[in-house]
Amino acid sequence: MGWLEENLGGVVGTGAGAALAQQGYQRLGDIGEQAYREMGQLGRDLESRYQFQPYSVFTPTGGMFYAGGAPAAQPGYRPVYGSGGFLPPPGEGQMQIGLQRPEGTGGIKPFPGSDTKGGIFQTLGGPSMPTTDELRSSMVLPREMMPPQGAQFGAQLSPEEMGFYRTLMGGSAGMFGRAMEGPEAREQAVFDRMQAAMSPAQERERLELEQRLAAQGRLGVTTNMFGGTPEGLALAKAQEEARNQAMLSAMEFAGAEQARQAQLGAGMLSAAYTPQQQLLAAIAPGITAAEQRRDQQNVAAGAYGETSAAALEALLQSAMAQGNLLGGIGGRMATSALGGLFG
Amino acid sequence: MAQQLSSINLVAPAFKGINTEDSPIAQDPSFAEVADNAVIDKRGRIASRKGYNVLTTDKTALGSESLKDVHEYRRSTGASVILSVGNNKVMTGTTTLTDISSSISISANNWKIVNFNDKAYFFQRGTQPLVYDGSSLTQLTGITSAQYGNEVISAYGRLWTADTTNDKSTVYWSDLLIGNDWSGGTSGSINISKVWPDGYDEIVALAAHNGLLIIFGQHSIVVYQGAEAPATMSLADTVAGVGCVDRDTIQHTGTDVLFLSHTGLRSFGRTIQEKSMPISTLSKTITKDIIELIQDENSFYRTVYSPEESFYLLTFVGQNTTYCFDLRGTLEDGSLRATRWPNSVFTAYERLENGKLYIGSKNGISEYKGYLDNGSPFRFKYYSPSLTFGDPSRLKFIKKINPTIITSSNTDIFIKFAYDFNTSYRNTTFTVQGAPVAEFGASEYVSFSELSGFTITSTLTNGIYVVDKFLGDFATAPTTGSGGGDLLNGDSYFNTTDEKTYVYITNAFVDIDTLTVSSSKEFTGGASTTRKALNAGGSGSTVVVGLEADISGSALSLQEINILALLGKTI
């Protein structure tokens, strides 16, 4: 028993040292798990903080741009299924430019079921539905304005602007259509009109000559030199020259008219996009403001993340120091206790 | 006491020509009821016409046919060729008719021939025209069958033709100066079917006058001005109701154009002035006779204008009747003095450039010359209108008829008279003695070299050569010269003893036949005036006096007829 009595202190010291080392180890493990949890929570917090924030830009003329979801419908507007956008009331010819990035593609496609009623997209999903490339080429939005995958954005003109757009687009299409037609029909039409305008005068001249020749008893004159009378030949020649001139004028006029139509078409086409351009011009400051706000949010989120990470780091360092301290105390106690027993 | 004789003096009887339009009783004695084979002579008297002297001695080519046309083809060299047509042949020459168309088949003789640019062109309806260049006769080329006109004229540097078989309203003209180009150059045509003033007519004849193209229809006339440039010529005038009977009745008188309308002879100038007024007819004194002849004519017409004879002859060939219109003057009503040549056998006329008048007939070519018809005498007739002596209600007893007749040969004269429109004439015959034939040499007036220095001149006065210094007829040589004194060189006389003419040369009379002839000309015989008093008898209220004579080699003129009559009781 003595030994036991004699060595009892060493045994107790050894046990106490081991228990402290165990506690230090356990604390380090807990600190690690806590850091893991906190960092995970920080990541989730940052994810939510960095998430895209929908926003809308309205113009004074009634146009609207939105990103990340359409705003609430205006009175009379109807929602477009799956798009988050709205269409104007039926009959107003409002075109909804609702786009979303298709899955797995970098392109864009119109909202399913959107009805343009004579707009540039005739019947979406139908035989004449434009391809993505056509749409891309028809859209004027810059690529950087494309929303992220799965995100939504849209631009919406006011009914007046849309009417203006439709009118000018229709006129432009008509002008280009006529400009692209073959000139023969138009030349003939212009020539016919010129002939119709000249015909009464020519008929009067012919009748006057006929009357004069009749008065002169020369209606029956036939000559080898002139065919009929010299006056008749002169009149026929003059009329043929006028006819030839009219033909040339008709050709020149038709060509000039086509050029003018093409010019007008181009002008109309350009003007047709004026509302859209103005809309885009108007939303640029809005987008900038939204982006600034988002940047601020991103900065705030980054600061939050860095601060949280630093706090976690400090906590982790403190916990690690505490663990190391307990482990060192426990180790020395155990060493000392063991040395008494066997020493 | 014996009743005084009343006298009717018919001075220059019938010098107004025939008048069958007015009542014989009320007629001017200056008219004639009958004036056959007569003309109005240069002194305004009625006189016998000339006869025709046949030139053709060989008419084998003509056969028994008559000439249908005679034409003088004159060349730029001055030479001329007499062309004639007949018996479906074209012939040249006058004494011998030489057929120049043996290589061409000709089936009709109604040719009209014109000179144009040194060639002669022959046209008749439906037949390819012919052209004669002085050496050969060929068919005209450059013309289509649709242009085979019946009428052709040469005017304003072109040939003009009309009246084709199927087209009676179109006038065609050739290229300038090219008679064989009717489809090129400046050739052309004009259809006047819409110009006729009364809706429809058919072209009969063409004429050119004073820059005008005159288109004669059957019953209307259309006149175009500026025909020098036919492409621009224009209608100048139209006349409705007056047309032309036949293309061959148109004659140019230099100042006017005469043509036969359906109502008589007309002047284009006066027709244009007076339009279709009937007063403008030139044959007003014989209108009904002319119309009757026109209506009965079934052959063709021939006319000629002779400025030398101052007449326009109009022959109705089918009726052997010719009317002679004197163009020296007109009557008060504007008509021409007309006489008639019955039984005329003339079928063609051509007045030559030298003034001769050629006549075509069955005998070939003749010249209007002399006073025999192909060697035979012809009957000259004059009958006055019914004379009333100013009082148709009283009987007249013709006591004396004193005609004054001028002729150059012995001629039997038949004076006839009848009362009260009786056609059984009382007849009185006498013979007028013509003047002796005063000729130098055989039958010519000649110039002699020996007399050329004696200033012996001759003049043609009223158709008679008058030689100065002719002293007259003497049985022996005269002693008094033409100056009333001594005989002078060149004085001449006719010796009735030896019937020779002597001329005084260098102190002696020399037989003129011994002189040297330097030139010779035709010399006409002299003419004598005969005044004869013939007894007459019978009575009546009106009396017609006539005179007939067989013209046999000499002209005969009726100067005057003086009629003495007793005026009896009123009946």
Image: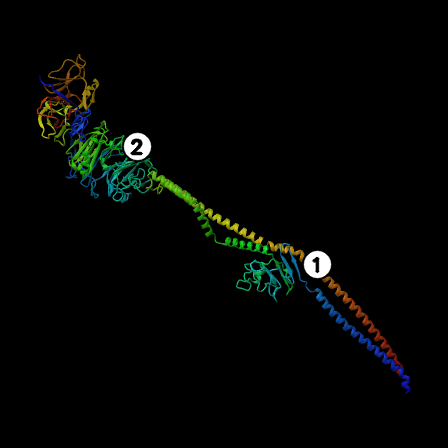
Question: Is the residue B494 above or below the residue A223 in the image?
Answer: above
Which amino acid type is marked by label 1? Answer: Gln
What residue is pinned by disc 2?
Answer: B210
Say left or right for A341 vs B489: right
Amino acid residing under circle 2: Asn
Seen from the viewer's position, the closer of residues B544 and B511 is B544
Residues packed near mark 2 inside 10 Å, few (<14), some (14 to 19) or many (20 plus): few
Instruction: Please state the horizontal and vertical placement of residue B303, each as a whole percent of the image.
Output: 21, 34
Disc number for residue A292 = 1
Side (left or right) of B20 relative to A24: left
> Can I make out residue B161 in this image?
yes
Q: Position of residue B23 (x, y in %)?
A: 17, 29
Pinpoint the chain carrying mark 1: A
Q: CA distance from mark 2 to mark 1?
A: 111 Å
The total of numbered circles placed on residues is 2
- Residue closest to the eye, B454 or A155: A155
- Which element type, helix, strand or loop, lies under badge 1? helix
Residue at screen point 63% across, 65% down:
A150
- The chain letter for the residue carrying disc 2 is B
Which image quarter: residue B92?
top left
Q: Secondary structure at mark 2?
A: loop
Question: In the displayed structure, would residue B377 be above or below residue A306?
Answer: above
In the image, A239: left or right of B82? right
